[in-house]
Amino acid sequence: MHQYAFEKLKVWVESKELIKEIYLLAKSFPSFESFNFTSQLQRSSLSITSNIAEGSSKHTHKNRTRIMVIAYRSKTLNLIIIAKELNYVSEEDYDRIRKVIEKITNKINSLRNYYLSKK
């Protein structure tokens, strides 16, 4: 089976794993949040992989860079911080997820810098 360029990117694979963690974690959120906070958190985590996939398919480094900036600006960390402050996630889950997000954003930033160097 053909593998697309984005599927070969370690940052995309790690971001896909983050989605799974976010979805599992969100199951424990209060039910009244299911259509608000929970769905925003899930959508924001999905947008990271979606933007990486979209960016890798662009034909110019300028367009790739622009899309990586969008992926880098994901609101997932912001929502995890708020979830912790609302006691929706434990300190342990927060620390684990935050480290994963920081690792991913560093890789996205490195990829963005790579594309910038190729202008």
Image: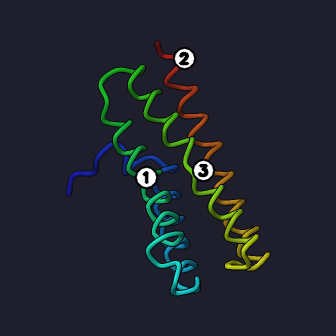
Write down the residue under mark 2. 117
Give the quarter of the image for residue 78. bottom right
The crowding category of the residue bearing disc 1, from other C-alpha atoms within 10 Å (few below 14, some 14 to 19, many at least 20), is some
Instruction: Say what amino acid the circle numbered 1 marks.
Output: Ser
Instruction: Say what amino acid the circle numbered 2 marks.
Output: Ser
Task: Tell me: residue 47, above or below residue 17.
Answer: above
Write down the residue under mark 1. 47
Whole-percent x, y for residue 67 in the image: 43, 34
| Nearer-the-camera pick, 12 or 47 | 47
Write down the residue under mark 3. 104
Please name the residue shown 42% across and 19% down the image: 62
Whole-percent x, y for residue 15 in the image: 51, 57
Whole-percent x, y for residue 112 in the image: 54, 30
- CA gap, disc 1 and disc 3: 13 Å
Mark 2 or mark 1, which is nearer to you?
1
Which element type, helix, strand or loop, lies under badge 3?
Answer: helix
